[in-house]
Image (cartoon, rainbow, N blue to C red):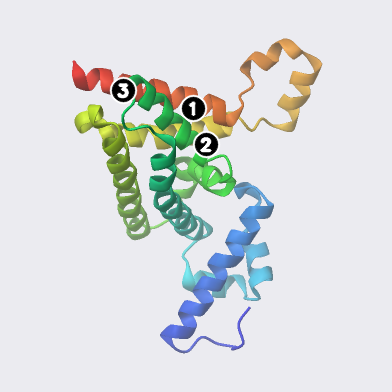
């Protein structure tokens, strides 16, 4: 992946670090998080596993950094989508539905981000040091703040509840994504017994409904 045997300068170390991140990102495009291993990453990046661990303390640290990267890109893209998808002169009930549609729709082509968000608390925040955990959480707080500011801009009726709503949105994305991707066994069960498909979720519509409900509820509480 690089044209030098050993990274001797800070610049070379950063090149190698980015190569590890980019290789892992490419793997995430091919496979679910649970299949991404340090052994395969080491093979693809052309380094011994012990050398990969010189740059990142664990697989989870690499994935947390990629989550932050994907999350920041999403936050950067949302303002234009919200401007195009939300009518600022519409009644609050309409803007609530439009906001939910914008957020859900914006995630429809961001499989890796959704995959990482679904694994954030249960997998990625484990097997890391307190220092890495704190660095990631500070980045996550900043990302939440960016979405909260956008939500408040288009729905000032949220009042001080925008940040709390945004945190709930992130949890909802992970939960709905997980349930909208059933296992092979569950898909077979749906095929064998169509009555069970009442519990099968289509990611974007299910997320949009949940976000509209969460947003309307937050506005109702703010006005109470």
Residue 28 falls left or right of residue 101: right
Going from the N terminus, do you reach mark 3 or mark 1 first?
Answer: 3
Position above or below: 81 against 19? above
* Residues at discs 2 and 1 in contact (Cβ within 8 Å): yes
Whether residue 36 can be seen here: no
Helix, strand or loop status at disc 2: helix
Q: Nearer the viewer, mark 3 or mark 1?
A: 3
Residue 8 falls left or right of residue 219: right
Q: Quadrant of the N terminus?
A: bottom right
Going from the N terminus, do you reach mark 2 or mark 1 first?
Answer: 2
Say few, some or many: other residues with alpha carbon within 10 Å of mark 1 (under 14 / 14 to 19 / 20 or more): many
Q: CA distance from mark 2 to mark 1?
A: 8 Å
Going from the N terminus, do you reach mark 3 or mark 2 first?
Answer: 3
Q: Residue furthest top?
A: 195
Q: Nearer the viewer, residue 25 or 203?
A: 203
Return the x and y of residue 184 as percentages of the image width and height: 74, 32
Residue at image position (35%, 49%) is: 143
* Residues at discs 3 and 1 in contact (Cβ within 8 Å): no
Tag 1 residue: 208
Residue at image position (61%, 30%) is: 180
Q: CA distance from mark 3 to mark 2?
A: 20 Å
* Residues at discs 3 and 2 in contact (Cβ within 8 Å): no
Q: CA distance from mark 3 to mark 1?
A: 16 Å
Say few, some or many: other residues with alpha carbon within 10 Å of mark 3 (under 14 / 14 to 19 / 20 or more): some
Return the x and y of residue 163 as percentages of the image width and height: 27, 37
Q: Residue furthest front?
A: 89
Tag 3 residue: 92
Tag 2 residue: 105
Q: Nearer the viewer, residue 81 or 162?
A: 81
Q: Nearer the viewer, residue 154 or 76?
A: 154
Q: Nearer the viewer, mark 3 or mark 2?
A: 3
């Amino acid at each position: 992946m690089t044209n030098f045997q050993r990274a001797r300068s800070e610049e070379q170390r950063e090149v190698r670090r980015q190569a590890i991140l980019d290789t892992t990102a490419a793997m995430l495009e091919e496979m679910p998080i649970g299949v991404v291993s340090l052994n395969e990453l080491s093979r693809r990046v052309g380094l011994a596993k012990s050398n990969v661990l010189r740059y990142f303390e664990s697989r989870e640290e690499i994935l947390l950094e990629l989550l932050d990267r994907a999350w920041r890109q999403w936050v950067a893209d949302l303002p234009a989508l919200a401007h195009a998808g939300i009518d600022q002169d519409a009644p609050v009930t309409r803007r609530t539905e439009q906001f939910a549609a914008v957020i859900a729709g914006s995630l429809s082509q961001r499989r890796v981000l959704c995959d990482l968000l679904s694994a954030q608390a249960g997998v990625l925040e484990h097997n890391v040091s307190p220092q890495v955990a704190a660095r990631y959480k500070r980045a996550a707080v900043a990302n939440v703040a960016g979405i909260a500011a956008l939500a408040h801009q288009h729905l000032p009726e949220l009042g001080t509840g925008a940040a709390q709503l945004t945190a709930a949105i992130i949890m909802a994305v992970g939960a709905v994504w997980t349930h909208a991707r059933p296992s092979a066994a569950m898909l077979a069960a749906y095929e064998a017994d169509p009555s069970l498909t009442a519990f099968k979720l289509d990611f974007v519509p299910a997320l949009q409904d949940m976000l509209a409900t969460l947003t309307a509820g937050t506005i109702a509480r703010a006005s109470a």
